[in-house]
Image (spheres, rainbow, N blue to C red):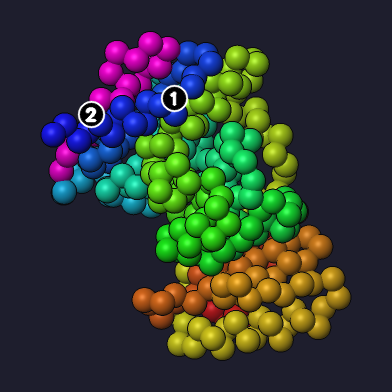
Amino acid sequence: MNYIGKYADFLETFLKAKAPVKIVLDVSNGPAGLVLEKLFKDRAGIEAIILNKEVSGEFPAHGPNPLVAGAADEVSRKVLEEDADLGAIYDGDGDRVIFISNKGKAIDPFDAFFLIRNRFQPPYIVDVRALSEFISPDPEIIEAAAGRSYIYKALKKENAQLGVERSGHFFFRDFFYQDSAVLATVHMINAVSALKKNGQSIDEVLAGLGSLERLPEMSFEVNDGEGVLRRLEAHYQGIPGFKIERTDGITIIGPDLALNVRVSNTEPVVRLNIVAKNRKMLDEKLIEIKKVMGV
């Protein structure tokens, strides 16, 4: 049976491009290219340039993790060279995707969520690293613990149509509540084509989302992860205007910044996500937070 063809036929039912789109896809020598090539072959209105499509477990082009520094350099350059509307880079097994703007810049998965969310009915599921209560307070956004299984369970519980995890997993009710990087790409193409029809680009829309400063997730080796969380809680619970939550690790939300610190289940590390109103505030608070954490 032609499973790739059947999968491509299924994905095609979601493709609703309203204007021509040029997209550069770096499949990282993984299997996603087999599906993407079938889906976009001779597709009117969509020009798909696929990079590193030879499937190889040795990943000769670059490592299989799209979040590692330098992994997206090739696709970013190609987006600019081709004057493409959108880029994407997939992980080794093709279930995660990081999108690239028309200016060659990586798009945070939570920003990608805001680009496609109006194509789905609420509620929406995001993981705690979104710090959504600070960035975009919205009762229709429900936070869950970080991790594929937690997003999946929350999606099913709420019967939600869309969920996202910061690592690049996008979940869909129409995909059995599971994650699909290729289906996320289809929905992003739909969003980009709608923007183009209105004379807009992704970069312009992203610029309008606000001027908040966010850092990539940081990991710190520690001997006592729970002790780190207790020190953070003790420090911030006495400061007026700060709210503390314990959905996953500790989330601290203040008037000018928010952070989440989680203890790894597999390594002696804690993981920090932080966002602030501006870069000066971010840099200053990061020093303070690291001091409290003892790292």
Instruction: Identify the image quadrant of the C terminus.
Output: bottom right
Q: Position of residue 224 (x, y in %)?
A: 49, 88
Quadrant of the drawing holding the N terminus:
top left
Q: Is residue 248 above or below residue 38?
A: below
Residue 10 rendering spot, x and y as whole percentages: 34, 31
Q: Which residue is mark 1?
A: 15
**What's the residue type where badge 1 is placed?**
Leu
Is residue 3 rendered to the left or right of residue 145? left
Q: Amino acid at mark 2?
A: Gly
Name the residue at 71% across, 86% down. 234
Pick whichever of labels 2 and 1 is earlier in the sequence: 2
Q: Which mark is residue 239?
A: none
Residue under the image location 60 percent in, 29 percent down: 203
Q: Position of residue 36 (x, y in %)?
A: 30, 30
Whether residue 112 is visible, yes or no, is yes
User: Count the marks: how many?
Assistant: 2
One can see residue 280 in this view: no
**How would you rate the neighbour count of disc 1 (Cα within 10 Å): few for under 14, some for 14-19, many for 20 or more?**
some
Q: Is residue 169 magenta?
A: no
Label 2 and label 1: CA atoms lie apart by: 15 Å
Q: Quarter of the image holding residue 288?
A: bottom right
Helix, strand or loop under label 1? loop
Pointer 2 residue? 5
Whether the magenta-drawn stretch holds residue 49 is answered as yes
Identify the magenta region: 38-56
Q: Is residue 224 above or below residue 49?
A: below
